[in-house]
Amino acid sequence: MAKIKTVSAIEPAPNKPTTQSKSEQTDDLASELASTLNKKFKSTNYKVAYFLEGDSDSPSNVSGWVSTGSDILDLAISNRPNGGFPIGRISEITGLEASGKSLLAAHALADTQKQGGMAVYIDTENAASEEFLSAIGVDLKKMMYVPLETVEDIFESIESIIEGVRKSSKDRLVTIVVDSIMGASTKIEMAAEYDKDGYATSKSIILSKAMRKITNMIGREKICLIFTNQLRTRLGVSFGDAWTTSGGKAIPFHASVRLRLKSVGKITVKKDGLEQVLGVKTQVQVVKNRMGPPMKKIEYDIYFESGIDNIGGWLETMKNYGLVTQAGAWYTYVDKTTGEEIKFQSKDFESKIINDPALKKTIYDEICDSYIFKYKPGAGIGIDDIVISSDVINEES
């Protein structure tokens, strides 16, 4: 009688050959191709192929931020807490005269030094004020001041700084401010007579070449490059944006962040019966932003003796988003963590939150939660729910 083989209920089933899904096969192919490319270009000492998720050394990753001196402007640029100017990217600050461009750049230098980094100030206008730089927190003994005249010299210096950082202290933050690119001439223009013109084109060509060379170099290092530039009026414009910047389109195209500053009022006080101007109110619009949503506008006060009023910007934002209620000169804030009602006047707000770090953090977190744009698909807005504005930023001729 033939024996019948019994199969136990717990006997493991024979292994079935596993097949990869089409997406998994594609990922393997992409990994193989990336490895091939990196081997091919290994002489450059840099990877050329990355995966944006998982590769922390990708040039597209922002390794850190340099504060503008205004926490609200930092949020408007980075769309995340504790942001500011992106490290490894190029930023441009534009505006009319006396709008606070150099001041904003100087605040970035001060924050760089607070982070233990090196501050480099390339001045083409010989207009740096030692007293004011010190007042906003710049350590002049540690700041490198480089007065230059031509665009060629500026970018040769920037390239030398980048090479020096690579060799000595690759992980150290370096912020380079060029104030201003409009004030820089070219070597051809410097050697020419005053009655000769037509050198604007040569400047644009040099800038285009320079930006192509340094953009990727900066992306691989912990370098924050900030240009200041002046606005110019485009004649004969009836519709659209009437403003443009000098030096062609190279910087606007290569910059990850572009800010436009405008003075909107004076800050005055009466003393001994006389009106004295203590500062100005400035509006900043983020006209281009690869870090977050563009077109955001914020306002802050600038005091001639101390720079940007950062905490005053907090209170203004809290008012705009309904985080405080106001009755006369008194404000009321309800701490959501404790339910406590906190009353104060605007002049006491700064000292109140500085003396209470826990309260400061709670308020900052609430400001961030209200201000930061949340990316989410399907916002539930139809074409009849939106308004198309003609107020756009367009610097094309």
Image (cartoon, helix red, strand yellow):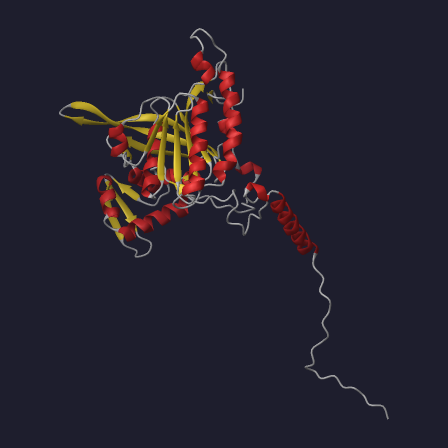
Q: Is residue 388 visible?
A: no
Count the marks: how many? 0
What residue lies at 67% left-to-right and 51% top-to-bottom? 29
Q: Position of residue 5 (x, y in %)?
A: 78, 86
Left or right for 5, reference 164: right
Q: Position of residue 202 (x, y in %)?
A: 51, 18
Q: Is residue 107 visible?
A: yes
What residue lies at 25% left-to-right and 47% top-to-bottom? 354
**Residue furthest bottom as drawn:** 1
Q: Position of residue 24 (x, y in %)?
A: 66, 56
Q: Is residue 82 above or below residue 278?
A: below
Camera-side residue: 348 or 308? Answer: 308
Left or right for 218, reference 116: right
Q: Quadrant of the N terminus?
A: bottom right
Q: Quadrant of residue 173?
A: top left
Q: Is residue 144 above or below residue 361?
A: above
Q: Is residue 150 above or below residue 25?
A: above
**Residue furthest top as drawn:** 195
Camera-side residue: 382 or 215? Answer: 215
**Residue furthest left as drawn:** 272
Q: Quadrant of residue 265?
A: top left
Q: Is residue 338 above or below residue 261?
A: below
Q: Quadrant of the C terminus?
A: top right
Left or right for 17, reference 277: right
Camera-side residue: 344 or 23? Answer: 23
Camera-side residue: 224 or 210? Answer: 210
Q: Position of residue 75 (x, y in %)?
A: 40, 41
